Structures are given as structure tokens and as C-alpha cells.
Amino acid sequence: MDNKRLIELAIEGLQAKKETIELEIQALSKGVRAAVSTFRRPSATKAAPAEKAAPKRKTRSAASRKAQAEKMRAYWAKRKAATVKKTSKGRKTTKPKAAKAAQPVPL
């Protein structure tokens, strides 16, 4: 056998291997695409995402607002009374008067 014939046989063998490798690559690619497509989010072109509606705010009636206002007035009145009791134990509740500003001395 001459060199030319050996090279031709080597090429044929490599081409056969190349074809089997390409078939394996195609099979793996299909499997990967199938697996990836199950984990992907739907694209914007396939389906437009629906806009989420803003959550509804709870509305209160005038009566419930009035009742809440009364409760808060009572709460703050009680708190103010407790503060006055604490400060009436010998401490002054009024703020000290500010000292008069020094007047300039005439020359």
C-alpha cells in the first residue's frame, strides 16, 4: 500500500467518527433545549404579562374614624394626666424663664 491510500483510509475513518460525534451532539443539544425551556420564563413575545392591580386600600366609615378619634383623645388625656402626676412630686412643671439679654453699656 502506498501513502496516498493510507491517508484516504484514515480520512474515511475520521469522517465516520465525526458523523457519530455530530449525531451525539445533536441528541444532547435537543435534551438541553428541552430541559432549559421548562425552566425559562415565558418571553414577552409569547405572552404579554398581565399588569398586577394595585391592592385595594381598606376604607373606613366616618363612624369608625370618629370612634378612633375618641379613643385617641382618651389615650392622650390619660397619658397627659400620668405625666402631670409624675411631675407634681416636687418638680417644677413650668419652663424656667429666659434670662434677660445683656444690654450694651453706653460709653
Image (cartoon, grey):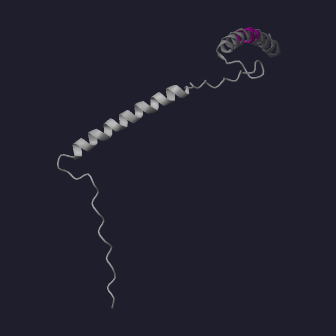
Give x and y (percent) for residue 53. Answer: 66, 23
**Placement of 92 over or under 3, stated as above or below:** below
Give x and y (percent) for residue 38. Answer: 66, 12
Q: Which of 56/94 is in front?
A: 94
Give x and y (percent) for residue 39. Answer: 64, 15
**Placement of 43 over or under 91, stated as above or below:** above
**Placement of 105 over or under 36, stated as above or below:** below
Q: On the picture, is 53 further left or further right than 48?
A: left
Q: Which residues are magenta?
A: 19-25
Give the residue at x 26% y 51%: 93
Residue 51 falls in image quadrant: top right
Residue 46 falls in image quadrant: top right
Q: Which of 18/54 is in front?
A: 54
Give x and y (percent) for residue 81. Answer: 29, 40
Q: On the picture, is 48 further left or further right than 102?
A: right
Q: Is residue 23 magenta?
A: yes
List the single residue furthest toward the bottom: 107
Q: Is residue 105 magenta?
A: no
What is the magenta segment's predominant secondary structure? helix
Q: How many marks?
A: 0
Q: On the picture, is 14 further left or further right than 90?
A: right
